[in-house]
Amino acid sequence: MLNPPAFSFPLETATVPVGDRVWQIRSLRSRDIFFATHTTAQRDLYGFVLWESAIGLSERLVAQPTLVRGKRVLELGAGVGLPGIVAQHLGGDVAQTDYQVDSLTLCAWNGLQNGIKTANFQGDWQQWHHAQRYDLIIAADILYDEAL
């Protein structure tokens, strides 16, 4: 087993049942920590939280695996990576992206801990330099506005 990447905030491993498999996903220990620190933290912590819609998207992919099987899949704002990891498991050829390099490090680690390897690269939506074409783009909890 690989050692998890080290960060200055507490992470925990969540056991996430999706379909016929239980996934081990390392993420921010508490959403309360995120909400208490995200406005003042030097590091953006959005990508370190396992959000409910990531689990929901993963469940949707398991319910309809033909969405990803045999297709090139791009995950935007992968964060801790559950949907992309599940999509790869279901037979997709997945590239996971996030603006935060540290989130991608954790995302890749989560995949490997579950026996899944995906391509990972930093993605800046304002300066997108990747020419690869994809059959499907997936994303969960990528837009957030504190005022909402």
Image (cartoon, rainbow, N blue to C red):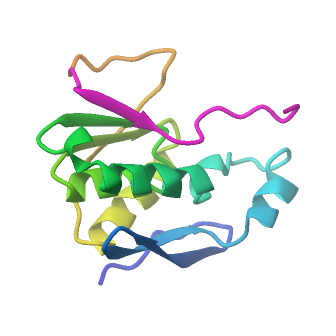
* Quadrant hosting residue 28: bottom right
**What is the count of numbered marks?**
0
Read off the magenta span: 133-148
The vertical placement of 70 against 50, above or below, is above
Q: Residue at x 81, y 64 (%)?
A: 32
Q: Residue at x 32, y 57 (%)?
A: 86
Residue 10 in the image: state x and y as whole percent.
67, 73
Residue 119 in the image: state x and y as whole percent.
24, 45
Observer-nearest residue: 148 or 7? 148
* Quadrant hosting residue 122: top left
Q: Residue at x 39, y 79 (%)?
A: 3
Q: Left or right of 130: which side holds 72?
A: left
Quarter of the figure with the C terminus: top right
The vertical placement of 110 against 61, above or below, is below
The vertical placement of 21 against 83, above or below, is below
Residue found at the very far left of the displayed protein: 70
Q: Left or right of 147: which side holds 97?
A: left
Quarter of the figure with the N terminus: bottom left
Q: Can residue 131 be found in the magenta stretch?
A: no
Q: Can residue 143 be found in the magenta stretch?
A: yes
Residue found at the very far bottom of the displayed protein: 1
Q: Left or right of 19: which side holds 103?
A: right
* Quadrant hosting residue 115: bottom left
Residue 102 in the image: state x and y as whole percent.
50, 52
Residue 89 in the image: state x and y as whole percent.
22, 59
Observer-nearest residue: 138 or 9? 138
Predominant SS of the magenta segment: loop
